[in-house]
Amino acid sequence: MLGSLAKWLRILGFDTLYFRQIDDNEIIKIAKQDHRILLTGDNILAKSKKIDSYILINSNDISGQLREVLKTVCTKQYAVGSEESAYCLLPTAYFFSRCIKCNGELVSTDRKSVASCVPEHVFLNFHSFLRCMDCGKIYWEGSHKKMMDAKIKDILAGIKDSL
């Protein structure tokens, strides 16, 4: 139920595991073993005494969900300045550093090595490519990146305004 949130957290560079179908006990086990924060919209799961660290997601839309997570993360780890002037400082160097499909790390790759992996018009019009080290998916800075950048800017501004 939080698949889009997982994708956007990966876009922001967060190491994010996501499972479409998983038993509550199994996800609690993984979260504890890997020292992860469990994100859930399930009130019963969130109130379970088995969970060490969680964020209960109340919003139904992706922008609201991201604001909930980032506001919690920002106020706990990245708040800068006094309480009145605190703002969210996420390390932008990590943005677009994870595969949105599998969570693998993205690395810069030689243009020639992707020639047979991307459409011809992409190869002809783009010069910088990233490859997922786990699944091999290729990424480039197309028009979708501008949309993502605008959404990130809007969400971070909303968090700054609410702190």
Image (cartoon, grey):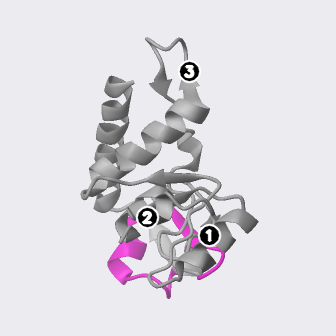
Q: With respect to residue 100, does 163 lie above or below?
A: above
Q: Which residue is mark 1?
A: 28
The image quadrant that residue 163 belongs to is top left
Task: Name the front one of labels 2 and 1.
Answer: 2
- Between 10 and 69, the one lying in front of the other is 69
Mark 2, Cα crowd under 10 Å, few <14 / some 14-19 / many 20+, is few
The disc, 2 or 1, on the residue closer to the chain's N-terminal end is 1
Give how far across and how far down residue 132 sits, in percent: 59, 73
Task: Please report whichever mark, 2 or 3, sits nearer to the chain's N-terminal start.
Answer: 2
**Which of pointers 1 and 3 indicates the residue nearer the eye?**
1
Amino acid type at mark 3: Val
Mark 2–mark 1 Cα distance, whole angstroms, equals: 13 Å
The answer to whether mark 2 and mark 1 are in CB contact below 8 A is no
Magenta-span inclusion, residue 119: yes
Labels 1 & 3 near each other (Cβ < 8 A): no
User: What residue type is disc 2 on?
Assistant: Ile
Judged left or right of residue 81, residue 150 is: left
Q: Are marks 2 and 3 in contact (CB under 8 Å)?
A: no
**Taking 88 as reference, is 97 above or below it?**
below
Label of residue 80 in the image:
3
The span shown in magenta is 115-135
- Residue located 67% across and 72% down the image: 30
Q: Position of residue 11 (x, y in %)?
A: 46, 58
The quadrant of the rendering that contains the N terminus is bottom left
Which residue occupies the extreme bottom position in the image?
116
Task: State the residue at coordinates (61%, 52%).
Answer: 53
Residue underneath mark 2: 44
